[in-house]
Amino acid sequence: MPSVVVVGAQWGDEGKGKATDALGDRVDVCVRYSGGNNAGHTLVVGGEKFVLHLLPSGILNPDTTTVIGNGVVVDLDVLAEELEVLHSRGVDVPHPLISANAHIITEYHKVLDKVTERFLGKRRIGTTGRGVGPCYSDKVNRIGIRIQDILDESILRQKVEAALDQKNELLVKIYNRRPIEAEDVVQSLLKHADAIRPHIVDSGRYINDALDEGKVVLFEGAQAHHLDLDQGTYPYVTSSNPTASGATTGGGVGPTRIDRTIGIAKAYTTRVGEGPFPTELFDEDGEALREKGGEFGATTGRPRRCGWFDALLVEQAVKINGFTDIFLTKLDILSGWEKIPVCVAYEVDGERHDVMPMTQSQFHHAKPVYEFLDGWSEDISKARTFDELPPNCQAYVRRLEELIGCRISGIGVGPGREESVAINDLI
């Protein structure tokens, strides 16, 4: 049975949660392998809207076991709150399994995230202030706190005190803030120990055992390819590796265990935070995409920057991730435009680029070269087969396939779980 990785092909907010949830009844194990609660997945099930930040999208499928992998950074307060919100709404969801090796976001990570971003001023990255970056920094610097550490109070206290020896120097002497008390941090983490203790696992072994038993395992990352620390539009990126290769390290499996990689791409393009965006719109079309698409951050509520589909952006993600399929979301939002521009190249200092340029400077100065496709006016939200889509809509999809070099196997035509068009089997 297959193991499948789901990756955003743009700058996030493509609808990975919808795609993952739509596959849910065929998935035995759903693994979140990167990021923290700086991301948000919006799911609409039975007319009800659910926004998840840390929980894997498969949590709403009763027959799917969810796992928070070792590559995730976990805010235990957020995890507890998300579960409580679901329970208060009458949704009976089990606690996800949590990797013993996942790192914990502490209060000092969140404080440092916010004061550092303010300190950067115009050079700010545009973080959510959730402490994700500082937590990953501690992981790399080998002074991080892991889930397994709350099983041993003595070790936990030693590690927190060691970390704060350094952090408090920064807070007091550089940022003019009060020092953080180690005991306050320790107690804030220990209050969750009893609740999560039964759910802590060796996630790599658990996932590999599931694959050995023939179970279907789906890996989902947060954010997207172009926010990847190594492959994205650095420095305006996240602090982890949401690309398909990140599933192997963040999930704890070997590369030979991955069977398919599915890219999720929006029928247009959005971005939250800072950084270059060649097809960004500042006119009524951009505002219409934002309003029709409900383009406001699921985690922060920030308005998303909106623009036309950028084929070079997605083609790069196809190439690097080795996507076998693309799930195209929010195609219904494009109904009503007479002509729909698609970026097919960039112009940089008078030179045409048919693939993404190599350097940050070139990409920053890239101007889109558009191809204009015929639009459609019909409501496509009731379509369930490709043939039910209007001819111009079908032509739009087929042209995107040609430009990005990957087949489009599924299409989202509305926010609901059932509002999808299947072209090929994704699993």
Image (cartoon, helix red, strand yellow):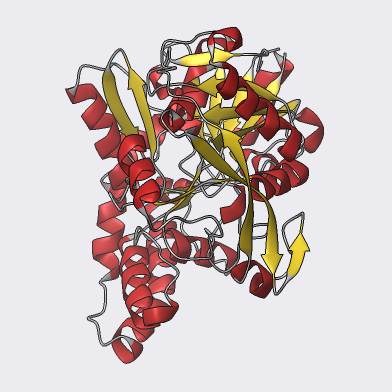
Lateral position of residue 375 relative to residue 209, left or right: left
| 206 to 184, vertically: above or below | above
Please determine whether, in this image, residue 418 is positioned above or below residue 81.
above
Q: Can you say which quadrant of the picture contains the N terminus?
A: top right
Residue 111, position in %: x, y? 30, 69
Q: Quadrant of the C terminus?
A: top right
User: Does 272 sit left or right of 92 as displayed?
Assistant: right
- Residue 150 coordinates in the image, percent (x, y): 40, 49
Evaluate whether residue 27 shows in this view: no
**363 or 111, nearer to the observer:** 363
Asked whether 355 or 173 is in front, the reply is: 355
Left or right: residue 356 compared with residue 73: right
Compare residues 345 and 338 and report the one nearer the observer: 338
Residue at 37% over, 85% down: 169
Query: In the picture, residue 43 is in which quadrant?
Result: top left
Residue 312 in the image: state x and y as whole percent.
69, 49
Query: Does residue 370 appear left or right of residue 72 in this picture?
Result: right
Q: Residue at x 40, y 34 (%)?
A: 55
Count of residue discs: 0
Q: Residue shown at 43%/23% (left/top)? A: 377
Say whether residue 196 is visible: yes
Q: For the view shown, which residue lies furthest in the right direction?
A: 256
Q: Observer-nearest residue: 74 or 50?
A: 50
Quadrant assignment, res 129: bottom left
